[in-house]
Image: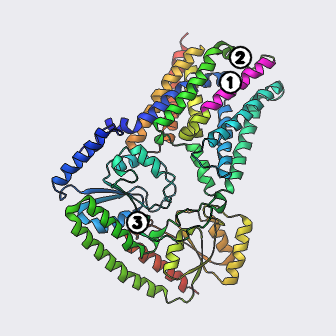
Amino acid sequence: MNRHLFPHSNNIGFAACILGLLLTLFAAGGAEARVRVVTTTEDIAAIAREVGGNFIEAESITRGMQDAHFIEAKPSYMLKVNRADLLIHQGLDLEIGWLPLLVTGARNPQVREGQPGSLDLSSAIVPIEVPTGEVGRHMGDVHPGGNPHYPLDPANGPLMAEAIAKRLGELDPENRAAYDANRQRFANRIAQKIAEWESRLAAFPDPVVVTYHTTWSYFLRRFGIESIGSVEPLPGVPPSPAHLGHLAETMKRRKVKIILQANYFEKRHSELLGRQTGAQVLALPVSVGGAPGAEDYFSLFDLLVDRLAKALSQP
Amino acid sequence: MSEFWTFMAAPAASCLILSVLYTYFGVHVLKREIIFVDLSLAQLAALGATTGMVLDVPPESPLVPLLAFGFILGGAAFFSTTRALASRVPQEAVIGIVYVVAASAALLLASRAPHGAEHIKNLLNGSVLWTTWQDVLRIALAGSAVAAVHWKYFRRFREQSENYLVQPFSTPDRIMDFIFFATLGLVIVVSVKTAGVFLIFTLLIVPAVCGALFSNSFTGRWLIGAGLGIATSILGLALSYKFDLPTGATIVTCFGIVFLALLPISRATNARP
């Protein structure tokens, strides 16, 4: 299929061309022509693979060890999006700094916002930390729609899978049943694993941690872990010495033993705080592909729960 | 190859226009020995944009380039005034002071803003890859306005540049100086978001320097430099595309390599009597 070779993007003829080619593609049978899914994060790609199985190929734009807020523009991103049948993003303004530019640059009308080839997964979940009242930069990098790090609650996994299965079924009706069956199997397995993870962490009464950024909110809420403060005074704002001093006092009083942070943030602030308070800095992957061992959505949580449980069990 | 042009036509078009414009200014700037003036002006533009960010101005608002241009005009007025001190203080020293102070002030402002560090990094690196036809149009319009002014006073600016370091200072001279900095500033404001501070400095200096290696005349330097600038930036775009590298940094590195490659060639040609 040479759909991506048409240089003119903005005319109706091109759209008709795409549509015509798509129709022939589906008419020819979806079995050999796999749906090309491009996602903004590896979490979404991992879940899409669970749902799509052999009928799709899923590729992520960002790597798991990258902060999806910011990426350096590279030509291959445009090629990927240009060839995509379905572009899935995490939404809630996570990719606001680059995705609109990327979609414009990629010249693929099919995946523009509002088109069937564009899916905002945040519509499938219930966001937390939705700010009330007027939002301004003085509040830090607050996302008006709520905290965008929702894949870190494993209970959101099945909701994401459901939205992906529904959209894949619309784009590729022939395999709708398969997508639905895969989604169901994924949901069952997640439910079983959540019980396992919860029981492992339940061994520690009233666990408290300090986090670096609001990355962890969904995860901590799921497993009943309390965060008594964050290294960043406001989301996205690096700490001042006064803020760190204050936080160190609180940590000593509450006997906090763990500073939890995403492994792509710089560690020097957390390490300074760790030296002052004796707490351990846990720099962990926050996405599939974020570290060796976190190869899919399940092993990501296996790794997180394991590392956290080990840190909590230390005296 | 057709794919390359699908994605890279707009970035290539902007590199083409900017090569011609910046090489022209570059030839002037080299003669005047104020090499770092554009880093200084670009940093003032960045300070303006950062001020906008701290004041909660949305990034796509027209107020942002206006703020940036306002800061640049302030710098232009300052530079044309401090030239009066030229006998005791070299202009380059003043330019250096403005650069570091503007850069540090931007860092101070950004330190209180969420993701300020990334904002500063974006201003340095730019995002040539995301250049749209709208950006190209904006650069072309600003470029035409600047070209009109310089077409009218072509001789006047050239004489001023030739005698910049020796000429005594007069009021009309100071006005021309201000117009020179203001027009350069306008080009910087419309291009800093896509090209970034590093690429702008490269486009200003490297082609003009390469031109000076092979020609003594003003127009000769400009033509050679602009041609080299266009060719090198398109080479950079192509390499960035082929090897999937960040575009701005690839282009800047290509300019460095082209400069190094031309040095021995120019020595060989100049050695002949």
Q: Which residue shows up at 52% across the image and 18% down it?
A: B223
> Given contact means CB atoms under 8 Å apart, are the residues at marks 1 and 2 in contact?
yes
Q: Residue B67, image x and y in percent? A: 67, 41
Q: Secondary structure at mark 2?
A: helix
Q: Which residue shows up at 35% across the image and 69% down it?
A: A161
- In the image, residue B48 lies in the stretch drawn in magenta: no
Q: Is residue B4 placed above or below B108 in the rendered structure?
A: above
Q: Are marks 3 and 1 on the same chain?
A: no
> Given contact means CB atoms under 8 Å apart, are the residues at marks 3 and 1 in contact?
no
| Distance Cα–Cα, label 1 vs label 2 | 10 Å
- In the displayed structure image, the side of residue A124 where residue B256 appears, left or right: right
Give the residue number, with chain letter if any, for mark 3.
A43
Q: Name which quarter of the figure residue B267 lies in.
A: top right
What span is in magenta? B170-187
Give the residue number, with chain letter if any, for mark 1.
B180
Q: Residue B217 — which label?
A: none
Q: Which residue shows up at 46% across the image and 38% down it?
A: B132
Which amino acid type is shown beneath numbered disc 1? Phe
- In the image, residue B173 lies in the stretch drawn in magenta: yes
Q: Main secondary structure of the magenta part?
A: helix
Give the residue number, with chain letter if any, for mark 2.
B160
Instruction: Assign the C terminus of chain A to one quadrant of the image.
Output: bottom right
Q: Secondary structure at mark 3?
A: helix
Q: Are marks 2 and 3 on the same chain?
A: no
Which amino acid type is shown beneath numbered disc 2? Gln
Q: Are marks 1 and 2 on the same chain?
A: yes
Q: Is residue A289 placed above or below B104 in the rendered structure?
A: below
Which amino acid type is shown beneath numbered disc 3? Asp
Q: Nearer the observer, disc 1 or disc 2?
A: 1
Which chain letter goes with mark 2? B
Which chain letter goes with mark 3? A
